[in-house]
């Protein structure tokens, strides 16, 4: 860990006033402190925002609002989340470990960095950590890496489970910067790596995530987050699926489908959603709908199984919802 | 009985090596290489030296003194090249510098500022490549590993296989595996008047002292190893590794105590690991299932991992056998060492998978196949086993588990989205006991000390020594004070100095406790009749009874006796010889495993496990069960998750941390049904106990793999068995 200066702030205004080149906001610290210890990130100035009033879980007719510094565990267990949005609660519950979920915040979760082993090891090259240095993951150990949205410069997977559910739910972010407040669809927030994998999102310098809004979606009660991994806790997804369906008389009216563990960002699958729409809620529909789910996938030397796993994870989620 | 050390451990009062903090202590932090092979051309220490609190930086150009060579078995099972020997880099993650600072933070901070420049060469780090060109292993005098085993001499095994009616020949691959005990290697070293006291977790305090002393060029008597609590070892702390040597040498050089703690990442490379192996099994049988030939050819990184010697010669009867080890020498990889059930874990996975494949080929029940080839004595010498009830293990296990409900046809049992399968395997582990010494001492406070230079790495030895001591002296267990984990405690020689290895600690130490207790009682009786102040002074016919000395119409507790005679201690040392070699000794178990495999996404999940164990007398059911449960899970972890992933091009271990090196968590386990047959093996020792520590591990992976086959029809011969291998 490199030396840094530290400030603790009590308001968004104070936080923005402390932000500068090379500064980082500290909330739960589960990503930032970890990466500082590894010297993957070396902020010169750390701004503790845990005392900034960015809490609150509220719902009204338009939807659900979650404050940015709410803890993952508190959100997962909240009645306004677990009942109406099972896939969001499940995504949170299947993330990390209880200890981490007790600390990590919603805003921080959306900004967590990839679990790529090369990104996390300063002894190796990484275009995300050190732009232009190269990507050893392309020819290296890449079983856990992405197959969708990747580039020759970066094949890292977006690590968040929660973001997969939020993408499926069309969530919006509230952001505050020195220019004022703005909102942004989460789907528009993340960037694909292209030739600039170090630029991961649309956050402007110093800008702070203040909250997340989930538009009301009554049929999200019929949803599931399904996570496939080697061990059953404390591991990132090999593949995951957030799926919601609106079924009337055995016919799918609408569907929401997004996947994790396979994309350079949380991966919405509109083609699968369209293919489900208007079809009977049964296995043949599911199998036909996922036929093109992995179109455009670029499997790597150690993850050739991922396109098939993606399709099967979605089918399994749909089978689960079909009961 | 509960562990007597449990409260101290869970309340944090038990002091492990790195918990010791001494006045004036400095902190060492290791810097490791970031190439797999090459030379260090320069090291820029300027920024590190300028950082605050740096006392000294040791490098190949500013060496610590290691004048001696690693002695005895350490020369085979540990790293023989000392830190900073030269500027050569032999593997990724090799120690290239030690920064000593006033605080751990300062040492670690300065270490990060060191810039090392290398000339790198392509490393020989890919076992997949290297195994294509294996070599014969070295011959180490006195060590049977690596020797060709054949029966009859000069057997043409290929001809014997070809002549068999049913044949199975397959190759089974096991990746490198790391001990990953909870407590990383750590040492606190302090010199005073030419004598070293070192707190360093070890399985064998005396061997540790000998190794440290020899490498540092001092007398073994001048090194005092203190290691009462060890946070897991699994063979990884049987020998001495760089962190301990560095702490000892830096402390000597600086004239102040030095603590060195290994980071989790460093643990993968600066200490030993289980070498990868690739095993080809050829099994030939007649149509009745009688084995006609067994070929077991292994290629491994190291002589240390010899599955053929460890496993195949003790499992099944056959007239023709050929066992051979080849190695891939001079690889640019960290040193291999023993790891829980060395050779046995990999060997039993391959052999018991191959037997399952043979059962399929024969259309025979796997238990029936094993009973058809039941071994009554050792395969090569024909020496009878001391006490073998493996047949009963199969029978009782099959009943407890519900083996009769298994369908031979794979993939036929479905529960919702899950395919259910059952598999079984055999576990056999050599048992034995070393000659050793125990000292039993009565004290005026009414307690008795039972002391031996053995170790408790979480195995329960503290409790066993208290329990057996209490039984031998016939006093309550809370009056026994065990002493272990100290190189200055009694031992007799070259074998017992290695302490808790080979699952032999209980069978070695407990008979010596009985001998020492008897001799100590004789001393006490003598004392009671001859010591001034004794109420039994001059009496005849005095006897010891449950902590009291009885005679002349009176009796006195030994504590009161010693108080009255103003004597601080009365005791004796008892020694035992090795077990006689008229018989062979082994522990046995039959494992039964049920898995479910998701029909869509392929995750294999453990759903049930039963093991029936024949390990002699069970001295403490609670810790014994704990050992078996832990051992089984250890073996299942190899089946399900664990793999040290080495990048062939660089030699870097890409998952060298606790998040990416996948160990099982509680969610991955089920309650494991452990049943002990509990037949005392009185040929082995008067206490009748045999080894259990490694037994659960043996065969566990095969039981899992065989269950996966039964669930899916897929035979996975490369561990670990991950979901991607089972996607259909």
Image (cartoon, grey):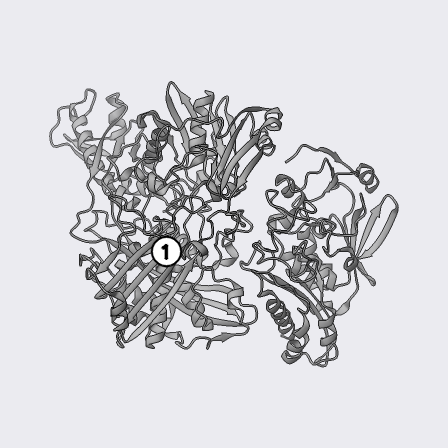
Residue drawn 72% across and 81% down? A249
The answer to whether B14 is drawn above or below residue B671 in the figure is above
The answer to whether B148 is drawn above or below residue B66 in the figure is below
Residue A82 in sight from this viewpoint:
no
Residue drawn 83% across and 47% down? A176
Q: Check the picture and name the quadrant holding the C terminus of chain A.
A: bottom right
Residue drawn 42% across and 60% down? B173
Q: Give the image location of residue A201, x and y in percent.
A: 76, 52
Residue B286 in sight from this viewpoint:
yes
* In the foreground, A312 or B286: B286
* In the foreground, A107 or B264: B264
Q: How many marks?
A: 1
Q: Check the picture and name the quadrant holding the N terminus of chain A.
A: top right
Q: Residue under circle 1?
A: B299
Q: Give the image location of residue B388, x and y in percent.
A: 23, 59
Quadrant housing residue B230: top left
Q: Give the image location of residue A35, x and y in percent.
A: 64, 43
Quadrant housing residue B283: bottom left
Residue lying at the far right in this picture: please name it.
A179
Q: Secondary structure at mark 1?
A: strand
Q: Give the image location of residue A136, x and y in percent.
A: 61, 51
Q: Chain of mark 1?
A: B
* In the foreground, B317 or A321: B317
Left or right: B592 in relation to A97: left
Left or right: B670 in relation to B473: right
The answer to whether A323 is drawn above or below residue B480 in the figure is below
Instruction: Report crowding for label 1: few under 14, some 14 to 19, many 20 or more residues within 10 A (C-alpha).
Output: many
């Amino acid at each position: 860990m490199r030396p840094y200066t530290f400030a603790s702030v009590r308001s968004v205004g104070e936080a923005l006033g402390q932000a500068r080149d090379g500064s980082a906001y500290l909330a739960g610290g589960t990503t930032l402190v970890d990466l500082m210890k590894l010297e993957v990130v070396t902020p010169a100035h750390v701004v503790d925002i845990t005392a900034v009033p960015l809490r609150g879980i509220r719902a009204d007719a338009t939807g659900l609002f979650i404050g940015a510094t709410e803890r993952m565990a508190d959100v997962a267990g909240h009645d306004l989340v677990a009942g109406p949005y099972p896939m969001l609660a499940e995504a949170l519950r299947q993330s990390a470990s209880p200890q981490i979920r007790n600390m990590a915040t919603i805003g921080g979760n959306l900004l967590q960095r990839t679990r790529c082993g090369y990104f996390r090891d300063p002894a190796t090259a990484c275009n995300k950590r050190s732009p232009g240095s190269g990507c050893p993951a392309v020819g290296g150990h890449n079983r856990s890496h992405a197959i969708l949205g990747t580039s020759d410069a970066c094949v890292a997977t977006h690590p968040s489970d929660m973001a997969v559910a939020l993408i499926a739910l069309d969530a919006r972010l509230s952001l505050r910067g020195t220019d004022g407040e703005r909102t942004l669809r989460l789907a528009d927030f993340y960037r694909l790596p292209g030739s600039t994998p170090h630029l991961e999102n649309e956050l402007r310098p110093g800008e702070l995530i203040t909250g997340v809004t989930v538009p009301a979606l009554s049929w999200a009660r019929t949803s599931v987050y399904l996570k496939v991994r080697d061990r059953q806790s404390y591991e990132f997804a090999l593949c995951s699926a957030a799926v919601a369906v609106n079924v009337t008389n055995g016919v799918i009216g609408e569907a929401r489908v997004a996947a994790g563990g396979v994309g350079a960002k949380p991966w919405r699958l509109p083609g699968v959603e369209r293919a489900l729409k208007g079809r009977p809620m049964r296995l043949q529909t599911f199998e036909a709908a996922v036929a093109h789910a992995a179109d455009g996938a670029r499997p790597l030397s150690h993850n050739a199984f991922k396109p098939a796993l993606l399709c099967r994870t979605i089918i399994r989620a749909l089978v689960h919802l079909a009961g | 009985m509960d562990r007597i050390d449990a409260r101290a451990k869970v309340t944090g009062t038990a002091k492990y090596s790195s918990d010791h903090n001494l006045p004036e202590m400095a902190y060492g932090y290791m810097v490791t290489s970031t190439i797999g092979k090459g030379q260090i051309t320069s090291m820029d220490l300027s920024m590190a030296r300028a950082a605050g609190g740096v006392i000294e930086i040791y490098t190949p150009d500013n060496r610590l003194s290691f004048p001696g060579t690693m002695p005895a078995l350490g020369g085979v099972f540990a790293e023989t090249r000392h830190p900073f020997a030269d500027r050569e880099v032999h593997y990724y993650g090799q120690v290239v510098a030690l920064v000593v600072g006033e605080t751990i933070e300062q040492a670690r901070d300065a270490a990060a500022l060191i810039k090392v420049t290398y000339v790198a060469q392509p490393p020989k780090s890919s076992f997949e490549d290297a195994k294509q060109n294996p070599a014969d292993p070295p011959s180490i005098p006195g060590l049977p590993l690596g020797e060709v085993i054949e029966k009859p001499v000069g057997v043409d095994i290929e001809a014997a296989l070809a002549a068999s009616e049913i044949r199975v020949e397959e190759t089974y691959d096991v990746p490198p595996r790391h001990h990953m005990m909870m407590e990383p290697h750590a040492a606190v070293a302090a010199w005073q008047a030419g004598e070293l006291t070192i707190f360093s977790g070890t399985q064998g305090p005396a061997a540790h002292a000998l190794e440290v002393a020899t490498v540092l060029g001092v007398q073994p008597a001048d090194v005092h190893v203190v290691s009462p609590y060890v946070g897991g070892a699994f063979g990884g702390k049987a020998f001495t590794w760089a962190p301990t040597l560095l702490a000892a040498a830096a402390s000597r050089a600086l004239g102040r105590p030095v603590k060195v703690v290994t980071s989790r990442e460093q643990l993968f490379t600066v200490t030993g690991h289980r070498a990868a192996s690739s095993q080809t099994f050829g099994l030939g049988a007649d149509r009745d299932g009688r084995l006609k030939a067994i070929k077991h050819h292994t290629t491994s990184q190291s002589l240390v991992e010899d599955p053929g010697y460890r496993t195949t010669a003790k499992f099944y009867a056959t007239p023709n056998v050929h066992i051979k080890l080849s190695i891939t020498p001079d690889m640019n990889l960290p040193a291999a060492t023993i790891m829980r059930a060395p050779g046995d874990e990999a060997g039993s996975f391959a052999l018991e998978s191959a037997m399952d494949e043979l059962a399929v080929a024969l259309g025979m029940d796997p238990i029936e196949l094993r009973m058809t080839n039941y071994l009554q004595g050792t395969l090569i010498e024909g020496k009878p086993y001391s006490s073998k009830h493996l047949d009963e293990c199969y029978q009782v296990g099959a009943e407890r588990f519900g083996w009769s409900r298994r369908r031979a046809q794979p993939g036929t049992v479905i529960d919702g989205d899950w395919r259910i399968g059952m598999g079984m395997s055999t576990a056999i582990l050599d048992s034995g006991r070393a000659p050793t010494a125990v000292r039993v001492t009565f004290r005026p406070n009414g307690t008795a000390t039972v002391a031996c230079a053995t170790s408790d790495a979480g195995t329960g030895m503290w409790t066993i020594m208290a329990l057996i001591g209490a039984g031998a002296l016939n006093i309550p267990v809370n009056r026994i004070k065990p002493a272990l984990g100290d190189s200055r405690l009694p031992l007799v020689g070259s074998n017992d100095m290695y302490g808790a290895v080979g699952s032999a600690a209980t069978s070695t130490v407990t008979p010596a406790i009985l001998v020492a207790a008897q001799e100590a009682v004789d001393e006490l009786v003598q004392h009671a009749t001859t010591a001034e102040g004794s109420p039994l002074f001059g009496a005849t016919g005095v006897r010891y009874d449950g902590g009291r000395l009885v005679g002349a119409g009176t009796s006195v507790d030994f504590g009161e006796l010693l108080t009255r005679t103003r004597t601080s201690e009365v005791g004796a040392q008892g020694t035992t010889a090795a077990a006689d070699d008229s018989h062979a000794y082994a522990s046995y178990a039959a494992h039964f495993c049920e898995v479910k495999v998701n029909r869509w996404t392929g995750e294999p999940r453990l759903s049930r496990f039963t093991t029936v164990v024949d390990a002699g007398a069970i001295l403490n059911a609670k810790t014994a069960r704990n050992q078996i449960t832990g051992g089984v899970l250890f073996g299942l972890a190899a089946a399900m998750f664990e793999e040290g992933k080495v990048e062939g091009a660089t030699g870097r271990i890409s998952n060298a941390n606790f998040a990416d090196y996948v160990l099982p968590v509680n969610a991955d386990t089920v309650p494991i049904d452990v049943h002990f047959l509990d037949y005392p093996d009185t040929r082995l020792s008067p206490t009748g106990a045999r080894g259990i520590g490694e037994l659960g591990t043996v065969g566990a992976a095969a039981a899992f793999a065989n269950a996966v086959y039964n669930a899916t029809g897929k035979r996975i011969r490369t561990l670990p068995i991950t979901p991607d291998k089972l996607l259909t």
